[in-house]
């Protein structure tokens, strides 16, 4: 009897799951995030439409993920997650995205790696004499600051609590002074507000001066 109940429960769950997939697909087919007002779009995805379309055009040719979900929706879903840090299920429930939690997870993993592989080389620190000269000139022209090639600061990026069983990385290493687990990420940008260096190797307990 218990086995029959288990099989029945599994069938019902599968049917509900299949029905939800059909509903989500129907919502996706009818949605177009690019029809949102410009201000609402930026508040949702943190980037203007023009930049999103440019990035999609550059990244989509490298899309090898086997998915029935359009690339632009997977990309925008990832941006939404980066910008809000919400639960994956909540991200997928956004009426403009309409994806299951598992689909959000797969999209995040793939899109994140794709961005690093395709665009990662564009973040580089001025190394040639010409690059250094251009950066100094830019800072002086724009901000009146002499002899500067970059503006540096650190920020805490929240993370899920690490495993407490790893003796080499105790939880206390990642607890920052603000009371949550994080990585203390150091970043440098130039006069154009473009990142030229990013260091995400240090835990939240590390002071800015120690990076």
Image: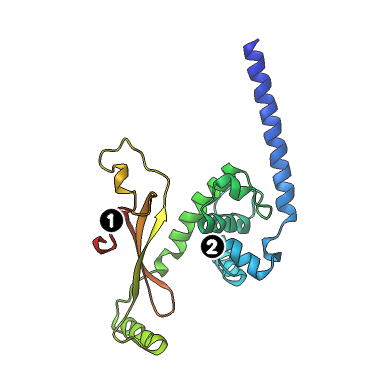
Q: Is residue 133 above or below residue 50?
A: below
Residue 47 placement, left or right of 191: right
Query: Could you tell me residue 124's position as x and y percent?
Result: 36, 70
What residue is rendered at 37% in x and 84% in y? 139
Circle 1 SS class = loop
Question: For residue 21, which quarter of the picture?
Answer: top right
Relative depth, front residue between 37 and 26: 37
Relative depth, front residue between 58 and 166: 166
Circle 2 SS class = helix
* Callout 2 crowding tier (Cα within 10 Å): few <14, some 14–19, many ≥20: some
Query: Residue 206's mark?
Result: 1
According to the picture, the residue beneath numbered tag 2 turns out to be 59
Q: How many marks?
A: 2
Quadrant of image for the C terminus: bottom left
Relative depth, front residue between 46 and 55: 46
Query: Could you tell me residue 89's position as x and y percent?
Result: 59, 44
Quadrant of image for the N terminus: top right
What coloring was used for the rendering?
A: rainbow
Q: Earlier in the sequence, mark 1 or mark 2?
A: 2
Query: Could you tell me residue 167's position as x and y percent?
Result: 26, 38
Q: Nearer the viewer, mark 1 or mark 2?
A: 1
Relative depth, front residue between 122 and 37: 37
**Residue 31 in sight here:** yes
Residues under numbered marks 1 and 2 in contact, where contact means CB atoms less than 8 Å apart = no
Q: Residue furthest front?
A: 178
What residue is rendered at 51% in x and 53% in y? 85
* Callout 1 crowding tier (Cα within 10 Å): few <14, some 14–19, many ≥20: some
**Residue 67 in sight here:** no
Query: Residue 63's mark?
Result: none
Residue 58 placement, left or right of 40: left
């Amino acid at each position: 009897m218990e086995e029959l109940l288990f099989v029945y429960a599994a069938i019902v769950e599968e049917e509900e799951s299949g029905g939800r997939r059909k509903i989500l697909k129907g919502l996706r087919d009818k949605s177009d995030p690019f029809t949102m007002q410009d201000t609402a779009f930026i508040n949702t995805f943190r980037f203007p439409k023009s930049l999103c379309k440019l990035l999609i055009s550059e990244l989509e040719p490298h899309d090898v993920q086997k998915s029935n979900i359009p690339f632009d929706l997977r990309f925008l879903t990832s941006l939404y997650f980066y910008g809000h840090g919400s639960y994956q299920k909540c991200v997928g429930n956004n009426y403009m995205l309409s994806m299951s939690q598992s689909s959000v997870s797969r999209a995040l993993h793939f899109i994140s790696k794709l961005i690093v592989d395709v665009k990662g080389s564009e973040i580089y620190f001025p190394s040639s004499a010409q690059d250094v000269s251009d950066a100094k000139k830019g800072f002086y022209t724009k901000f009146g600051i002499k002899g500067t090639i970059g503006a540096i600061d650190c920020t805490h990026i929240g993370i899920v609590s690490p495993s407490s069983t790893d003796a080499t990385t105790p939880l206390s290493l990642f607890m920052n002074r603000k009371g949550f687990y994080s990585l203390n990420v150091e970043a440098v940008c130039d006069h154009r507000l473009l990142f030229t260096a990013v260091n995400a190797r240090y835990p939240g307990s590390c002071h800015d001066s120690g990076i």
